[in-house]
Image: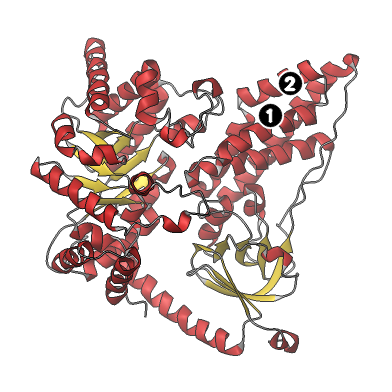
Amino acid sequence: MPSENRAKPEVIVQGISASQGIAYGEIFVYLQSQVEVPNYQVDPEKRIDEVARFDQALLVTRQQIAKIQSEVEKNLGADEARIFDAHLLVLEDQALITETIRDFETTGRNIETCFNGVAQRYIQAFAKIDDEYLRERAGDIRDVAQRVLQNLLGQAENSLSRLAEKRIVVANDLSPSDSASIDRSAALAIVTDSGSKTSHAVIVARSMKVPAVVGARDLTKRVRTGDRILVDGYEGIVILNPSEQTLFRYGEIQLQKKSFEQRLLESIRQPAVTRDGVDVKLMANIEKVEELPQVKEHLAAGIGLFRTEYLYLSSARIPTEQEQFLAYAAAAEALKPQPVIVRTLDLGGDKPLASHPDLFPHEANPFMGFRAIRFCLEHHQIFRDQLRAILLASAHGQVELMYPMISGVDELVRANALLEECRVELRARNQPFDEKMAIGAMIEIPSAAAIIDLLAPHCSFFSIGTNDLIQYLLAIDRGNERIANLYEPTHPAVLRTIKHIVDEAHRFGRPVGVCGEMGGDPVFVPLLLGLGVDSLSMTPSWLPTVKYLVRAMTMADARQLAVEALAMDSPKEIYAKCDAFYRARVKVG
């Protein structure tokens, strides 16, 4: 190690683990420049030329993205290349294009100004979405808008395709285009100041099998190209100027992690059965059909949550019955005879339709406002299209339907009545569907948790959405940094509520799953199983770790853990007990 680095103090920066692995080397600091957009009035006689200039920029941008997509498919594979399908969809978004031209015709300002203004409105709308995966669509629009503006202004595009030598890329953030252009042979790791676990930079890093840490705040301001850092993609840590002792310790950790990962790979092919012989149903959460290969690769026991909002948010218009049917049927065909639980539309709240702002008027408290089942019961035609699509898909595999944000019996009864009307329509069309398709309700509102006995006669299963249930139960806005520390899944009220849901549902013979974040967190898995939960659904990448844990524990121990946790009054002490249970059974090394 260079002597100048030995003299510098070791500094640890905590970020968010995004792609596993450990890397050590020199930094290349990449600072993406933002386009400066001029603002001026266009002469009336030049307005036709201005629109033509816009059309040409869109065409050139399409060609650039198609070229990047082709290179990504060649270097990383078809799945990673599909990242850019969203970019091409942005360029085909008639709402965005039409609004730009309308603004231009109304104001007479140059097309860059009009396009940038419309794009920023879309970016802000998606950036407010709570769902991490869907929020990343703001990055898609930002990236495409940057390219279009560069082409309008005749500027060269940014590129990371020619790193001089093996480097750790450190950036404020990486757009999908930046991520895709990274030189695979020279990138040791990726670290960003901002970003999330679902950002395109992370997807590319995982595909390249290099470590990645996101959310390392202001790291780009603390380092220079040529500095040496160590990146711990397991714990989300970046270490500046690591000492010889730190480098030695991480060398040992790397060997242990590789050994553990090998055991996980061996475990994924084994059944999810506890040491005392209890089968555990481990399922996957997905946003879109492109995730099906990962679901199958990790041998999930079906899909416990197919979020359907992406079909609506990734298009400039509301998808048709046929378009939805094709997506749901593809999942059913791919996974049959395993179940695919399709959740009906959960728009509103943090997921408004940017292309149809009239459907979601401004609300002071949208999370508790006009969203999910409430929206669907007001907009029958949109809801009917989706219900018919789900029914039609049920002829292609074991499809089950689940309503979100149910708060009382009336909503469930009204939704089921509309579903029955859709059944009648399909029978009249002579179109086949599963007459016995299972109907479920998500339990994410405290009022629903309190009346499981009243809801049970109207559905055949329940799924606990822990994210919202905890938020509503504890009156904690997870997005509010001042009180986010109060969001505690191990709060006694949360555990007692889950226990009540399970006990009441089982009394009526209804199974209960968990499809929120708790269901995929290995620290909470034994506790949930001990409380009597019948199935867990999670992000596919969590399945190997959770399955390994299930195979390393006994259900008897999990039930005892739940008994002890229910008798405790401190969320932190309950968490510590769950963490100790997990660490005692999943030893990395």
Mark linked to residue 103: 2
- The amino acid marked with disc number 1 is Val
Q: Specify few, some or many for label 1: CA neighbours under 10 Å numbering under 14, 14-19, or 20 or more.
A: some
Label 2 near label 1: C-beta < 8 Å?
A: yes
Task: Residue under label 1, please give it.
Answer: 118
The residue sitting at 27% across, 25% down in the picture is: 411
Specify the color scheme.
secondary structure
Q: Is residue 520 left or right of residue 533?
A: right
Instruction: Say above or below: 44 vs 559.
Output: above
Q: Quadrant of the N terminus?
A: bottom right
Asked whether residue 124 appears in the rendered view, the answer is yes
Residue 104, by quadrant, is top right
Asked whether residue 336 appears in the rendered view, the answer is no
Question: Which sits in the foreground, 474 or 319?
Answer: 474
Q: Secondary structure at mark 2?
A: helix
Question: Which sits in the foreground, 366 or 246?
Answer: 366
Q: Specify few, some or many for label 2: CA neighbours under 10 Å numbering under 14, 14-19, or 20 or more.
A: some
Image x and y of residue 126, in percent:
56, 37
Image x and y of residue 170, in percent:
67, 64
The residue sitting at 62% across, 52% down in the picture is: 180
- The amino acid marked with disc number 2 is Asp
The residue sitting at 84% across, 20% down in the picture is: 49
Callout count: 2
Disc 1/disc 2 C-alpha distance (Å): 8 Å
Ranked by sequence position, the earlier of labels 1 and 2 is 2
Image x and y of residue 571, in percent:
33, 63
Residue 427, by quadrant, is top left
